[in-house]
Image: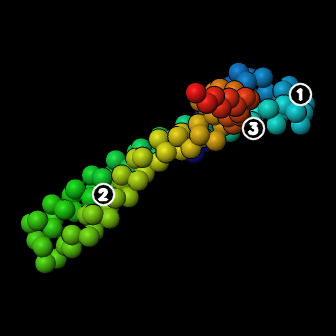
Amino acid sequence: MLKKTYYKMGAAMTAGMLAMSGGAAHAGTNTFSTIAENMQLSASAIPGLLTALAYLFGLLLAVLGVMKIKDHVENPTQTPLKDGAIRLAAGGALFALPIMLEAMFETINGGTVGNSANTQAASLRTADFAIH
């Protein structure tokens, strides 16, 4: 009896969600260009996600590195110092990764992420060698 109640509730929720989203009326309106636009729009959020993950895992590894160094101080024979140092170095590298990628992008493209203006190489227009 309880299973039937869950099935009915699930069916009602599914029907309600389909009614709120428009159901199958939107299924035929997707074309290749709208799908490509949606993919491009979704892909534009990937750098922000990678930045957040790099900061999160960088902080996590830094905290774990400090804890390993604490373990080494308390019991140096069982926990080598290199374990904590490796975690600290990896955490620092992950924490610096978004900053380094932004600097590389600005160097190559000549502007911020949203700016499409490219820099140009310096050129020598005139040369004047005055002798006094």
In the image, residue 63 above or below residue 13: below
- Mark closest to the chain's N terminus, 1 or 2: 1
- What residue appears at the point 84 percent right and 27 percent down from the top-left corner? 26
Q: In front: mark 1 or mark 2?
A: 2
The dot on residue 29 is: 1
Within-10-Å neighbours for mark 3: few <14, some 14–19, many 20+? few
In space, the residues marked 1 and 2 are separated at their CA atoms by 52 Å
Q: Where is residue 77 in the image (x, y as percent from the top left)?
A: 13, 78
Q: Label for residue 39?
A: 3
Look at the image and tell me in which quarter the C terminus lies: top right
Q: Residue at x 54, y 39 (%)?
A: 102
Q: How far apart are marks 3 and 1 (CA)?
A: 16 Å
Q: Which amino acid does label 3 sit on?
A: Met
Residue 116 relative to residue 97: left or right? right
- Relative to 53, say whether 78 is above or below: below
Instruction: Answer with mark 3 or mark 1, whichever residue precedes in sequence.
Output: 1
Residue at numbered disc 2? 88
Element assignment for label 2: helix
Residue found 43% across the figure and 51% down from its top? 94
Residue at the spot 65% in from the left edge and 32% down from the top edge: 129
Front in this rendered view, residue 113 or 12: 113
Residue extending farthest to the left is: 74
Identify the amino acid type marked 2.
Leu
